[in-house]
């Protein structure tokens, strides 16, 4: 029994590739767990901000692709979900911009809207339709605080705006929703 053999260059390269593959597999599994943990919030945000469900789905998919691509840039200053929502915000804007530039897409959106009207509204759908009617700055704060349960500080961090702005936008959004719901309440009690 002599000294152990010196690994060849080929053996070292194989070992490095195998180790890299193992690290990537672990990273894949961890990222998949993060996606599962936060996909509901990202999807809810995208659906409330996008003009169509198809645009929301595209934005969600793009969000997770960008998050995977730039995972190393997550600094950990805030929550991972907040980071994903910031990415999603940008993705919704990008998808909506592409949508506006495409004449074919506007015809598809009209057809999809007609199919949704045929399905008949439900109570949650009516509420989300009212939320969708809010100006975008109020809508995103109402969704973050009212739907996803973010506190003012977290919403401010995600949107990169002062807490006072979150409060005022939320107040205006809630007031607009209450005003829109008021005629509905009168009809229900009459």
Image (tube, grey):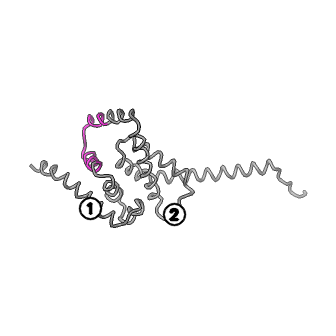
Q: Is residue 175 left or right of residue 165?
A: left
Residue with the mark numbered 1: 171
Q: Are marks 1 and 2 in contact (CB under 8 Å)?
A: no
Numbered mark located on residue 63 in the image: none
The one nearer the camera, 124 or 177, is 177
Residue 126, percent from left and from top:
25, 46
The one nearer the camera, 134 or 152, is 134
Instruction: Report the span colored magenta.
Output: 113-132
Label 1 and label 2: CA atoms lie apart by 30 Å
When the figure is inspected, residue 116 is found, relative to residue 30, above or below; the finding is above
Check disc 2: other Cα within 10 Å, few if <14, some if 14-19, many if 20+.
Answer: few
Check disc 1: other Cα within 10 Å, few if <14, some if 14-19, many if 20+.
Answer: some
Q: Main secondary structure of the magenta part?
A: helix
Residue 115, percent from left and from top:
30, 34
* Residue 63 covered by magenta stretch: no
When the figure is inspected, residue 171 is found, relative to residue 109, above or below; the finding is below
Numbered mark located on residue 76 in the image: 2
The one nearer the camera, 163 or 2, is 163
Residue visible at 53% across and 52% down?
31
Residue 148, percent from left and from top:
36, 56
Extreme-left residue of the structure: 190
Residue visible at 41% across and 51% down?
40
């Amino acid at each position: 029994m002599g000294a152990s053999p010196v690994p060849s260059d080929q053996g070292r390269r194989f070992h490095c590739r195998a180790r890299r593959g193992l690290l990537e597999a672990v990273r894949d599994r961890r990222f998949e767990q993060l996606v599962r943990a936060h996909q509901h919030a990202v999807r809810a945000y995208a659906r409330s901000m996008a003009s169509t469900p198809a645009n929301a789905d595209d934005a969600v998919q793009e969000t997770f692709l960008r998050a995977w691509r730039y995972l190393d840039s997550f600094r950990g200053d805030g929550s991972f979900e907040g980071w994903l929502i910031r990415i999603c915000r940008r993705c919704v804007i990008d998808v909506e911009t592409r949508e506006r530039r495409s004449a074919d897409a506007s015809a598809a959106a009209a057809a999809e809207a007609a199919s949704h009207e045929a399905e008949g509204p439900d109570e949650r759908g009516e509420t989300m339709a009212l939320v969708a009617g809010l100006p975008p700055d109020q809508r995103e704060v109402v969704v973050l605080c009212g739907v996803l349960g973010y506190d003012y500080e977290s919403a401010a961090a995600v949107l990169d705006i002062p807490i006072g702005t979150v409060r005022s936008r939320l107040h205006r959004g809630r007031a607009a929703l209450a005003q829109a719901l008021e005629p509905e309440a009168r009809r229900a009690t009459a």
